[in-house]
Amino acid sequence: MSRTYNCPSDDGSRVKCCHGTKPLMRKLIADPIISLDGYFTSPKNKIDWFGEFDSEEWTWSSDILRNADAMLYGRVTYDEFRQFWPTPDPKQMGIDPYLIERLNNLPKMVFSKSLAETPWKPASLVREDPGAAVARLKHEPGKDMVVVGSGTLVASLLQDDLIDEYFIRVRPIILGAGRPLFVDHKARHPLRLISAKTFKSGTIGLHYESLSPKSSGP
């Protein structure tokens, strides 16, 4: 696949043109939920403050997965999801069938050194360093990879500058304490806002792309 650029024309304007045939790297997309003060869990590692999910949020999640062919999970989120999504509950709750199908059937890579097995298939355990594994995966053929929840994994990949886009949902609550999602004492990570959405629940959806030189660029 060729990458398209805005190139100068003879009259000084800018037109679309292609340079070379360098293949695009796969994107890594993070889809976390945080509190207004930036925490992804409470001090006791609880997420009961997430509240109820509505159709707007199911649509938000479905849209993120439309160009994805792989899911990345940390141990805790994988364990939580496997107890819910394969059951009849999502359908009975009226959740978008597309989202149910995607979460159940997309290949899952679970980053854990303690899990012995991955009963929610298709899934594979990844024991190696997340940064090294994801850097390699981004150069392999494929579509987007999405890491949903999985705060510890997201924090690690942030520090390695491997996340290309963030779809962040900010809940209207101040926890005051907990586990912060975005922590890196060694570097800053500039972003560009793509879009913002206000949900009826008061949650704010923010879509950013990374301006890091390590993101999936030309």
Image (spheres, rainbow, N blue to C red):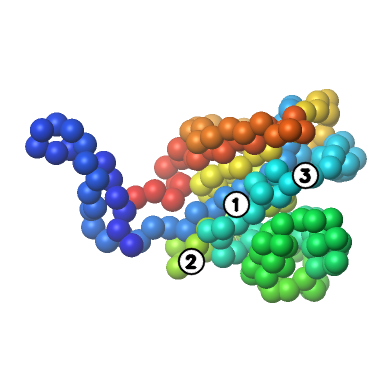
* Amino acid type shown at disc 2: Gly
Are circles 2 and 1 on residues that touch, CB within 8 Å? no
User: In the rendered structure, which disc, 2 or 1, sits on the residue that comes first in sequence?
Assistant: 1
The residue shown at (73%, 36%) is 34
Q: CA distance from mark 3 to mark 1?
A: 15 Å
In the rendered structure, the answer to whether residue 155 lies left or right of residue 54 reads: left
The N terminus, quarter of image: bottom left
Disc 2, SS: loop
Task: Give coordinates of residue 200: x percent, y percent.
Answer: 73, 33
- Which mark is drawn over residue 142? 2
Task: Give coordinates of residue 9: x percent, y percent.
Answer: 14, 39
Q: CA distance from mark 2 to mark 3?
A: 31 Å
Residue 36, quarter of picture = top right
Q: Mark 3 — residue?
A: 54
Q: Mark 1 — residue?
A: 63
Disc 1, SS: helix
In the rendered structure, the answer to whether residue 93 lies left or right of residue 67 reads: right
- Residue 212 seen by the camera: yes
* Amino acid type shown at disc 3: Asp
The residue shown at (85%, 67%) is 87
